[in-house]
Image (cartoon, rainbow, N blue to C red):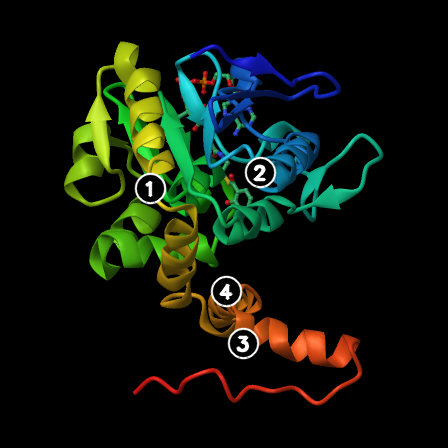
Amino acid sequence: LNWQCFSEGYEDILYHKAEGIARISINRPRVHNAFRPLTVMEMQKAMDDARRDSEVGVIILCGTGGRAFCSGGDQKVRGDSGYKDDTGVHHLNVLDLQRQIRTCPKPVVAMVAGYAIGGGHVLHMICDLSIAAENAVFGQTGPKVGSFDGGFGASYMARLVGQKKAREIWFLCRQYNAQQALDMGLVNTVVPLEELEEVTVEWCREMLRNSPLALRCLKAALNADCDGQVGLQELAGNATMLFYMTEEGQEGRNAFVEKRDPDFSRFGRNP
Ligand code: 2NE
């Protein structure tokens, strides 16, 4: 792909676009792409751009260097109530990023080479699809390093791999290879490292050929099954958008603007 670079102004990430695909790469390979508050803020900014760009249909999240997708929160900037930014303020802003990925109406694909560990493992789980390279390594470390993610990191994991396996992953803090991750439903496919981007782009292209509205509603529907009232809000927002697109919905607005009574009589009542 002929990636166009939009990385200017970013310090911790690289941001590229090509043929309807946006690619956000964590670019801190010296720490296995651990995230600090700035990294997360930049990812949020790029995610927002990709969401708003009508040319973009699919978003890829990945890490640079081939040795790590992401190793979670940067333990070297961890303060006593979160991860410290340059001004000393403590954050857990990766939780906002998780929700942003989840509620983005476009498919988000994790392209995982190397370690997806801790909060980095949760990030790939939150993505709609995960394509793993053969060198990928998955696992949580929270109980070892004095942390845990009891939100999506626990409950959504259990939806993916089942309660027993989720407890094993969190309680024992083992590492799992790509094949094991595939076997337990953590990832969609495993490919040789040198084919990782090519296969990921092919999966993206397949999705781009399908109806964006159908994908959007399906993502919201699958989220709604897990996300309670917030999930229902997201699904219902799509229903409202679709209603706005109908003549029946538009009649209500037109009548108000034209200061007349609405006439819904021409709209049928399907059984
Ligand atoms: C990922 C892993 C298993 C790799 O091991 P290895 O032996 O291949 O590499 P090494 O030497 O540990 O790492 C290379 C460099 O990257 C740094 C290391 O410190 C090392 O740099 P130097 O010390 O040599 O200068 N590095 C790696 N991960 C880092 C991290 N997360 N923060 C800062 N520096 C890191 C191994 O590196 C590992 O276990 N890493 C730690 C994984 C971890 O515990 N992550 C945090 C989990 S908690 C979390 O992410 C979280 C949450 O639970 C809730 C909310 C938000 C975040």
Question: Which quadrant holds residue 107?
Answer: top left
Residue type of the residue flagged with mark 2:
Ser
Residue type of the residue flagged with mark 4:
Leu
Disc number at residue 248?
A: 3
Residue type of the residue flagged with mark 1:
Asn
Precedes in sequence: disc 4 or disc 2: 2
Which residue position holds label 2? 54
Question: Which quadrant holds residue 117?
Answer: top left
Q: Residue at x 19, y 37 (%)?
A: 182
Disc number at residue 210?
A: 1
Report crowding for label 1: few under 14, some 14 to 19, many 20 or more residues within 10 A (C-alpha). Answer: few
Distance in Å between CA atoms under marks 3 and 4: 11 Å
Q: Camera-side residue: 208 or 191?
A: 208
Q: Residue at x 63, y 32 (%)?
A: 46
Task: Provide residue 16's location: percent of width, then percent of height.
Answer: 56, 20
Report crowding for label 4: few under 14, some 14 to 19, many 20 or more residues within 10 A (C-alpha). Answer: few
Q: What quarter of the picture does the C terminus occupy?
A: bottom left
Find out whether the residues at labels 3 and 4 contact each other: C-beta distance under 8 Å. no
Q: Is residue 155 visible?
A: no
Q: Nearer the viewer, mark 3 or mark 4?
A: 3
Q: Camera-side residue: 123 or 202?
A: 202
Q: Secondary structure beneath disc 1? A: loop
Precedes in sequence: disc 3 or disc 4: 4
Question: Which quadrant holds residue 205?
Answer: top left
Give the side of residue 140 with respect to residue 21, left or right. Answer: left
Task: Provide residue 187's location: percent of width, then percent of height.
Answer: 26, 38
Task: Provide residue 228's location: percent of width, then percent of height.
Answer: 45, 72
Residue type of the residue flagged with mark 3:
Glu
